[in-house]
Structures are given as structure tokens and as C-alpha cells.
Image (cartoon, grey):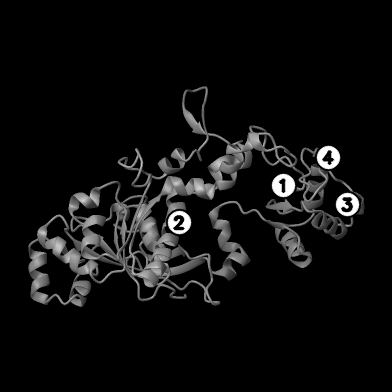
Amino acid sequence: MAKLLQGVRVIESAVLLNGDTLGMHLADLGAEVIKVESPSGGDYLRDILGQIVPRHSPAHLQVNKNKRSVAVDVRSVAGREVFWDLLDTADAFIDGYANDATDRLGIGYAAQRARKPDVIYCQYTGFGRRGPYAAIPTHGQMMNAEAAAVTLATHDDGFVRVAENRELMWGTSGGGDGTAAGAIHAALHVVAALWRRDRTGEGAFLDASASDAVIAQGWIGAVYGWNYDRITDHTGLRAPGSETLTGAKYQYYRTADDRYVLFCCIEPKFWTRFCEVVERPDLATRVTEAGAVDFGRDDHDLRRELQEIIGRRTQAEWVDVAIEHRLPIGPAHQGASSLQEDRHVHDREIVVDGHHPVAGDFTYVGTPVIVDGHAYETPAPAPAHGADTVAVLGELGYSASRIAALEEAGVIATSGS
């Protein structure tokens, strides 16, 4: 695994998925990420969303891998002194708490900048720091809901349930999970800010919002929705509210082994080539929409013809056809477990098998970018609460006696305390 951020030290002060996931991306890129936690339990992501063994949830094992943990009570004077000593050695700080929580602790951006003017400070929360919703603490789907990425309907029983999004281009529903989406954008901006600092010496305050990130990643649906009435030629666009994926040439089809492929031969060159491969030249002239692409929209007869053709071969056979003839036909897997069987996923090593010293065997999600031909290595296991307190403070020059006194006073905690 390429260590693109080797030599960069990041201090992470966060609980739950937002700040944790941002720190994970930077750690995966080679930064040394030190997770500063409270001595009284720390990040409770360890304790929720299921347990492999106590204090080791799958979410914690994934998003806190490749990190170190230092347990310090920054509410105390002595704890803040430890924090400032640690920050003096750092390049960037991750604030995963809503609104002004770190300000009230005395370690917010203004205080950090006064001590370390070139600090890269990234606050990553559900709704961001600026704006009327900034003070609202958020969980998971709240970010997607605020970004209009969740379509709802009230059913006859009076209960509200998630419904199909029939907006043009699926609205912002294509923006992905808010926590994950925002972490990527936050990490990108941290790296960009580090690059600027190295050129100019200037620090930065980065205000990252998960709900904004969903809108940014679902930009195509947002842009088409906001500008729909300004479009003068609607060729190739379905009407908002109409059924999605009605095209024959851009469609899911069932294969002979009861699996699925997504068929996307919408350009004339691909459609003609496909018709040649399946020995159906009579279909080559079947055009619904003349132009650069033809979705075959609402051509139900052609859709039935294609289902009959696709149904003659297995999913793997169709993928082989796509590879050999360079056709836009790909597997449509059902369920995350099916990904572990996919040869392409396997070859790219995005599924990473590892072993945690306490939780045992564990399968991680790696990184989607291969750098210089090096795929993702087995990560360092997510740390126990306070596992690195003694080692990190020792690296700062703290004596064993001082560390022991801080622990006795309850200012710090170690994995053995």
C-alpha cells in the first residue's frame, strides 16, 4: 500500500462514523492518525451496531483501523496540557463534534490557531458548522434526509416508509450514504490544504458537511431538477415522476443462472456490435431515439427479445462476452456477500481479509485506488481504548513517573486501566 501521506500526523477527536471515517481515509493513505479519546470509555462506536467480542463492533474495526488511541481528559487543565503537547507535533486536526463543542473545551480552532497558526483544522459533521442547523446533533440517515436523498410515503396503515425515488436522474438519491460521502470530500480538502500549507505556510479551517456531500455527489439529479424548466430539448429525458429504467437498451436482465446483468449498449456502435455477436442483424436497425445514444425507451417488444437472448447464457458468460467484444454489459450483483466471489473485485483487492488480535478474523473494505500498482495491504488493527497512551506520551518526552502520575489522577487512561 502506497504511503502517500507518510510523515503527516493527524489528531482525531471524534466519536461515531463521521470523524472516524475521515480519519480512516487519511490513515489508509499513510498518515499517522492519533485518536484522542476521553478516559471514560472513549468512542462508543466500539459498543454499538453489533459486537464480535465486547468493545469490538464491525464498524469500529473498519473505520478505526491503522490508527493509534490516546485516552486524555481534555476537560482538565492537565489533560489540555497533554493535548497541546500532542498538537504541537501534528499537521492536522479532525473535529468530529457538532457546532462549538471543542470551543467550549478550550481546544477549538481559534485556540489552536493562536498556538499553531499553520494547523489544518477540519470539522466534519452532519450539517456542517455554518448555517442554522449547525447545532443539531445528527445520526446516519439525517444527513441523507436533509439532502432530499430519501423519498418517503405514508402507507394505508399510517406508517411512513421509504419509497422509490422517481425524480429525474433519481434526484440526490445517487449521492450515497452521507457519512461516507462527506468523509471523502473532507479528506480531499485536508490533503489540498496540506499541499497549500507546504507552498504558502498558511493553515486552514475546513467546514465539512455530510448533507452537503450527498448533494454534491448526487449533483446530476440536483442539476437536472433545478434546471428542468430551462431545458429546451428533452430528447432522451424521461418526465419527472415517470417510471425509471424503461429502456430496452439500458436495462437489467436475468441470466440463465438466475443472476443479473446491466445491459447498456445505448451507443449505435455498441448496439450494432452486440447484434453481430448474438447473430441478430435484424435488430441492428431497431432505433427508438435517433442520435448519439438510444435508450430504447418503452420498446417493450425489444425488451422481451433481449430478455430471451440474455437468458440463454450465464452471468459469467455474458461478462466474458463483454470483455472479449468490449461491450458495456456488467454484472449486477445482489447482496454484499456476492462481491467476495467476483473475480474483478478479488483482483483489485478491495475485499481485504485480516486478523484482529482480540476480535479474530475480520474482512475489511480496502481502498478503491491502486497507487503505483500496489493494492491495499492488511491494515493495522483498530486500537483498544487508550492502547497507545503510554507509547505516544513517551514519544513526547514524558517520563514514566509523569505518565503514572497522570494516570493515577485520572487525566489519562491506558488499555490496562
Q: Earlier in the sequence, mark 2 or mark 4?
A: 2
The span from disc 3 to disc 1 (Cα, nearest Å) is 17 Å
Q: What element carries label 2?
A: helix
Question: How packed is label 2: few (under 14 Cα within 10 Å), some, or many (20 or more)?
Answer: some
Judging by the rendered image, the residue that carries numbered circle 2 is 185
Name the residue at 50% across, 45% down: 215
- Residue 50 drawn above or below residue 392: above
Judging by the rendered image, the residue that carries numbered circle 3 is 284
One can see residue 51 in this view: no
Where does the image place residue 13, in percent across and percent down from the top left? Answer: 28, 58
Name the residue at 65% across, 53% down: 332
Identify the image quadrant of residue 59.
bottom left
Judging by the rendered image, the residue that carries numbered circle 1 is 251
The span from disc 3 to disc 2 (Cα, nearest Å) is 43 Å
Where does the image place residue 58, in percent across and percent down from the top left? Answer: 39, 57
Q: Quick check: marks 3 and 2 in contact, CB under 8 Å?
A: no
One can see residue 86 in this view: yes
Which amino acid, by three-letter code, is at mark 4?
Answer: Asp
Name the residue at 71% across, 37% down: 232
Where does the image place residue 40, in percent across and percent down from the top left? Answer: 18, 55
Nearer the observer: mark 2 or 1; the answer is 2
Q: Quick check: marks 4 and 3 in contact, CB under 8 Å?
A: no
- Residue 116 drawn above or below residue 239: below
Nearer the observer: mark 2 or 4; the answer is 2
Question: How packed is label 3: few (under 14 Cα within 10 Å), some, or many (20 or more)?
Answer: some
43 and 286: which is toward the camera:
286
Label ID, residue 301 = 4
